[in-house]
Image (cartoon, rainbow, N blue to C red):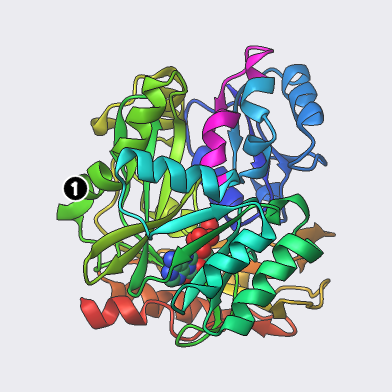
Amino acid sequence: MNILIVGAGGREHALAWKISQSPLLDKLFIAPGNGGTALLGTNVPLKDNDIEGIVAFARDNQIGLVVAGPELPLVLGLNEALKAVNIPCFGPCTFDAQLEGSKAFAKNMMRETGVPTADFQVFDSHERALEYVRGHALPMVIKADGLAAGKGVVIAQSMDEAEEALRDMMVTQVFGEAGQTVVVEEALIGEEASFMAFCDGTTIVPMPSLQDHKRIGDDDTGLNTGGMGAYSPAPILPQERYQAMADLAIRPITQHLASIGQPFKGVLYAGLMMTAQGPMILEYNVRFGDPECQPLMARLKSDLVEIMLACVNGTLAPEQVEFHAETSCCVVMAALGYPQSYPKGMAICGIEDAEQIESVKVFQAGTQLQDGVPVSSGGRVLGVTALGVDLLQARERAYLAVDKIHFENSYYRKDIANKGLRRS
Ligand code: AMP
Ligand code: GLY
């Protein structure tokens, strides 16, 4: 069948790489794609928010499966728009996508279904929110309800910071409509982990755990980013606990959604905080994490297309989802200045040399091909990913590969996987 992947990041290159290995694939298209996906299929100049354009393209090109990389098209109704023309979509319906599109929706559903999460209140009045915040102990976490490109969460250490966050979101409306409603919640302390499961509406199959590195600087300092590196498995969440974690963080939600006639089909991602009191769920995403998808695809043994079709058709079985026992590690190479302003257009060399190292795969994120040469076009440029017998070897290979790659003003964290190594 012909398959269309929507999205343009390292996640989408990793999905394209895995999908292109499937015997079920005929032609692969990626909208809009990047320099990496251009080597595996045909990039189509359509943005991820252009639902009409995506549907028209899918119809005109006999697409048998559309795979949604990011959340935005799902929140905007891609699943239903494709359903109207009988094209299956890997990724949930708009109702279920609110788990990521609205933090208030997600928190309320967690409360309703008994999923452990930080205590919270939802406000759509600035005065009420201010009054509540003034009456509570610090630190306190203030979150814009809607999608805010990863910038809508403030961990306020002082009352001034808390008041400023509320003013920015609710009065100045720096995130537009996304900040008209806010969630104010208790601050949790612990180590974070990423946990994802394939879902077909009823059956859920957990994937190996991962740990992301959200801050820009070593030792988790500086601004929040989309993620600067990830590895799998995360020793803080070992394999023997996957089923229990699925029962705690995923099943209550999928069962509830099925019971109200909105079965969840796709990947459900739970962002976890492993606290001294046990795991707490910080947030849900309705798609693969990025960069998490890159080290995950490096470990996936089974045919991804078969799994995705089973999710869509409601026929998912645990035997269909097998992962290699090896450990994987991904180091993101970014443009210096990310996540604020950064230069673009830097020519990248050394990817082929890097891939000569055993078990290394370089996924491209913010890149474009110019005359056959990859050139940077975004903040996160590459995801240098390696497998190893253990985390030490996977990390060593990933950093050896990073050393082979050059572009002007490149930046990467030097401490990816350190936390995991301390625990393993
Ligand atoms: P979210 O988008 O809700 O996952 O929040 C983004 C990041 O903010 C998370 O990855 C955590 O690092 C941090 N965060 C969110 N909620 C809390 C909380 N209740 N306590 C401490 N940190 C949090
Ligand atoms: N890496 C975190 C995310 O994809 O949201």
Residue at 81% in and 77% down: 343
Answer above or below: position of 111 versus 386.
Answer: above
Q: Which residue is mark 1?
A: 244
Q: Is residue 145 left or right of residue 210?
A: right
Q: Name which residue lies at 60% across and 37% down.
A: 68
- Looking at the picture, how far across and down is residue 51, in whole percent? 76, 31
- Where residue 36 appears, as percent x and y from the top left, is 66, 55
Up-down relation of residue 129 to residue 313 (above or below)? below
**Residue sticking out furthest to the left:** 240
Quadrant housing the C terminus: bottom left
Q: Nearer the viewer, residue 50 or 25?
A: 50
Q: Quadrant of residue 192?
A: bottom left
- Looking at the image, can residue 341 be seen? yes
Q: Residue at x 58, y 62 (%)?
A: 143
Q: Amino acid at mark 1?
A: Ala
- Residue at 54% of width from left, 70% of height from top? 133
Which stretch is magenta?
82-100
Res. 385 in view: no
Queried whether the magenta region covers residue 95, the answer comes back as: yes
Describe the element under mark 1 as helix, strand or loop. Answer: helix
